Image (cartoon, grey):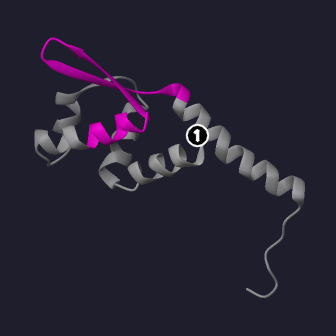
Amino acid sequence: MDMMEIANINKALSSPVRLQIIAMLADGEQCACHILERFEITQPTLSHHMHVLCDCHLVRDRKQGRWHYYALDEECIRCLASFFQELVQREKREGQTPCDEC
């Protein structure tokens, strides 16, 4: 995962609604109609949020009949978690301490 992908993911997660959707999807795949019930937004607004989440690969979708079903893209989530875990490990290895001048 490159820095541009990580930046796009962080941009997608800057919306409280999208963060709540991600939290909902942590419980498993959800139909768009069930996601929509949880928010006071229109269907086109939900579609926009889902498009943003799918574009950065945090969420995958599938269509069944007239409904879209959404789920977390576990590979993307693992890569993102690995990126942040590496930052923590790097800090521990390098023994960084807070700046005395700050």
User: Is residue 74 visible to us here?
Assistant: yes
How crowded pointer 1 is (Cα within 10 Å; few <14, some 14-19, many 20+) is rated as: some
User: Is residue 38 visible to us here?
Assistant: no
Residue at 43% x, 33% y is 57
> Which residue is the site of mark 1?
80
The number of numbered badges drawn on the structure is 1
Name the spot of residue 91 as percent of width and height, x first.
80, 57
Of 12 and 16, nearer the camera is: 12
Residue 62 location, quadrant: top left
Q: Which residues are magenta?
A: 49-75
Judge from the rendering whether residue 21 lies leftward or rightward of residue 83; answer left or right: left
Query: In the current view of this chain or complex, which residue is farthest to the top?
Result: 65
Residue at 41% x, 50% y is 13
In the rendered image, which quarter contains the C terminus? bottom right
Residue 27 location, quadrant: top left
Measured along the vertical axis of the image, is residue 35 above or below residue 8? above
Query: In the current view of this chain or complex, which residue is farthest to the bottom?
Result: 101
- Residue type, numbered disc 1: Leu
Measured along the vertical axis of the image, is residue 15 above or below residue 74? below
Of 11 and 102, nearer the camera is: 11
Judge from the rendering whether residue 90 lies leftward or rightward of residue 13; answer left or right: right
